[in-house]
Amino acid sequence: MKSFVQQAGLGDILEKVEAGERLNLQDGLALYNTKEILALGYMANLVRNRMNGDNAYFIYNQHINYSNICTNLCKFCAFGKDKSSDLAYEMDLAQVKEKVRARLLGSFWAWFQYAFDPLCGPAGIFTIFGSSSLVACGATGWGDEIAFGVKVTVSLSLATLPFGLLIGFFVALAMQSEEKTLRLAGGIYTTIFRGLPELLTLFIVYYGVQMGIQSILAWFGNDQRIEINAFLAGMIALSVVFSSYCSEVLLSAFRAIPKGQYEAGDALGLHRARTMRLIIVPQLIRIALPGLGNLWMNLLKDTALVSVIGLSDILRQTGIAAKVAKEPFFFYLLACALFLFLAVVSSIGISAIDRWSNRAGVRR
């Protein structure tokens, strides 16, 4: 097969792939322009085996499967991969540069993200201090990939938080309800999701939901394969786990609020919903905030679990970089530093919220 790759004119690129070196823009262009799918598949298997540590077979009729040659080793394949179109294989270098420019600066939001990126922006840490190192931004380093992993981790955490809080709030209400059925349902919910390991919950959501949907479709005679989004699966799994712990924190906070507060709202003629919003919830936030802050820290760490289902978070991106660059200690130490940085920033934010929630008591 190696001779076949060399006959296809990809021998130099194969040597780079075998050595784990980063590919440049010209290499990416050569891979796109070639029509030798078997050669590309062979190199894709080399990359996948190195990344995954096992044998990953190449499916020849799906062009998207060999894009990981570029995605993992250079920036070229970050755009223009479309299963239904072969246009990506016919671009010349000028078109490539134009698409890269449009991808980076084609919209105000993209420009805003680039300008204020703390890692790979104009004043980013990797840009200033790591320009000639393994974390350089651009085709020579892994800074862009790791910066993207940080964005995915933060985005997943922020997307999970409101859903987890909302579900936990209603579960806490159910657990203090006078209705026995609601209390029982809330207790079962928290027992299940606090008892299951987070990784197992993630697998159940990611694989179980897919199997359930496919079974329903098969019952209607549709054999279409369904694959749910890894980000969505991670958000759902982390939301239910977060809500199960959050409900216990909120339940304790509810019990710390005297019943006279509810009676005072009734005496003022407030509807129970307005009593909850104007009287109970402000006190609930102040009482539950320390516990919720700890849960937020746990949520940040639990996002690392989604790397096992293919989501490009901090741990997955640094893991790929460690395997390709053969510098595991450096990149995993970098992952530790990034998580600690997020924890410090979170602690500052939680302290600010705590001071804000206690401002009325301080004035008194």
Image (tube, rainbow, N blue to C red):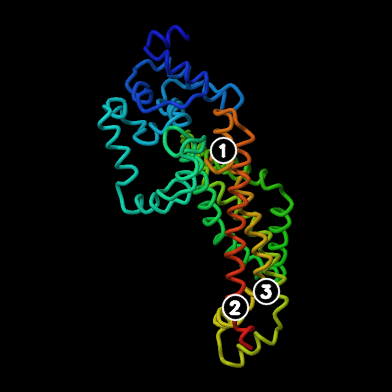
Q: In this figure, which residue is indicated by the disc labeled 3?
A: 287
Q: Upstream in the sequence, badge 2 or badge 3? A: 2
Give the number of callouts: 3
Q: Of 291 and 237, which appears nearest the observer? A: 291
Label 3 secondary element? helix
Q: Residues within 10 Å of mark 2 (few under 14, many from 20)?
A: few
Task: Answer with the quarter of the image where residue 355 lies.
Answer: bottom right
Q: Residue at x 72, y 76 (%)?
A: 255
Mark 2–mark 3 Cα distance, whole angstroms, equals: 9 Å
Query: Is 26 on the left-hand or right-hand side of 349?
Result: left
Q: Residue at x 41, y 9 (%)?
A: 6
Q: Residue at x 64, y 90 (%)?
A: 264
Image spot of residue 172 (x, y percent): 66, 68
Image spot of residue 2 (x, y percent): 47, 9
Q: Is residue 273 above or below residue 35?
A: below
Q: In this figure, which residue is indicated by the disc labeled 1?
A: 318
Q: In this figure, which residue is indicated by the disc labeled 2?
A: 282
Q: Amino acid at mark 1?
A: Thr
Q: Is residue 125 above or below residue 246?
A: above
Mark 2–mark 1 Cα distance, whole angstroms, equals: 41 Å
Q: Upstream in the sequence, badge 3 or badge 1? A: 3
